[in-house]
Amino acid sequence: MAKQPVEVSIRAWKKNTVKPGREHGRVLLMPGTGYNCDRPLLYWSAQALVEGGWRIDRMNVAHASDDLSTVIPVINQAIDEWVASVRAESPDVRLLLIGKSLTTMTYPHVATHYGLPFVLLTPVLHHADFDPSARVIPVPRVGDDIVSESDAPSVEVARALVSGESNADSRYPGPAPLVCAGTADPFYDRARANALTPHVHEYPDANHSIEVPGHWRRSLDYLKEVSASVSQYAATL
């Protein structure tokens, strides 16, 4: 039986409190594999931003394949449609994206096309064993070639920036992202994270959900710290 193709949908969050047109900005909240927008890291980050006057749109991804090279372009297209729709309503509105794991791999597309701020929760900086395409977020400063991102045609602009031709401190176009990850996460790489952005928040002994198994108090403390970090990052935009 053939697998169903990946499906991506985006809807406004029912817990938004600010009326359209009066928001501080718009947020696209994006899930991980098996980690939807109601899971703690995403849910409480969204709650923190709603209190700050942002409006949240939530993405759902269904039937994602293990071959992430077939999934990411579909998610990128959904992001393109979201950006176009929001800007058609409010051309000058602030935009922010928050991705978890799977959806953090849309960051190169978002940065090279739009230069938008991005929160990378547990980013894939070391490839997943199950993924035959071995995709990770390319980090040019450690030698990755972002030309390999075939869905990023404006990549020559990014290469000029990250190579230092325009600004020696630049990595990708736009604001440097926020990275939040646990040190026990098998998909995390400290050197690559720090080469990608100066905004790196690490959580000792935490796994890919930024939880410490068997230590609920530390896990809840980390959840509060992540939510606060997301709120602080958004407040600088």
Image (cartoon, helix red, strand yellow):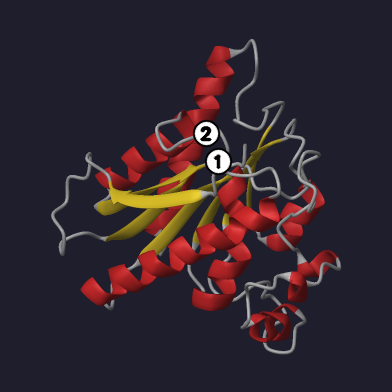
Q: Quadrant of residue 185?
A: top right
SS of the residue under disc 2: loop
Quick one: SS at disc 1?
A: loop
Residue 229 percent across, percent down from the top left: 49, 45
Of 132 and 222, the residue lying toward us: 132
Residue in view at x 65 percent, y 47 percent: 123
Q: Quadrant of the C terminus?
A: bottom left
What quarter of the picture does the N terminus occupy? top right
- In screen coordinates, is 195 left or right of 81? right
**Cβ atoms at labels 2 and 1 below 8 Å apart:** yes
Q: Amino acid at mark 1?
A: Gly
- Residue located at (58% from left, 65% from top): 176
Q: Residues within 10 Å of mark 2 (few under 14, many from 20)?
A: some
* 17 w.r.t. 109: above or below: above
Q: CA distance from mark 2 to mark 1?
A: 5 Å
Tell me if I can see residue 146 in this picture: yes
Residue depicted at 56% across the width and 51% down the height: 103
- 19, above or below 151, in the image: above
Task: Tell me if 228 is positioned left or right of 184 in this view.
Answer: left
Toward the viewer: 24 or 70? 70
- Residue 191, percent from left and from top: 81, 52
Task: Report crowding for label 1: few under 14, some 14 to 19, many 20 or more residues within 10 A (C-alpha).
Answer: many
Q: Specify the label residue 35 is tagged with.
A: 2
Q: Nearer the viewer, residue 4 or 120?
A: 4
Q: Judge left or right: residue 233 versus residue 172.
A: left
Looking at the picture, how far across and down is residue 234, in whole percent? 41, 56
Q: Tell me the residue that label 1 is attached to.
A: 32
Q: Residue at x 74, y 50 (%)?
A: 125
Picture coordinates of residue 179 (x, y %)?
A: 61, 50
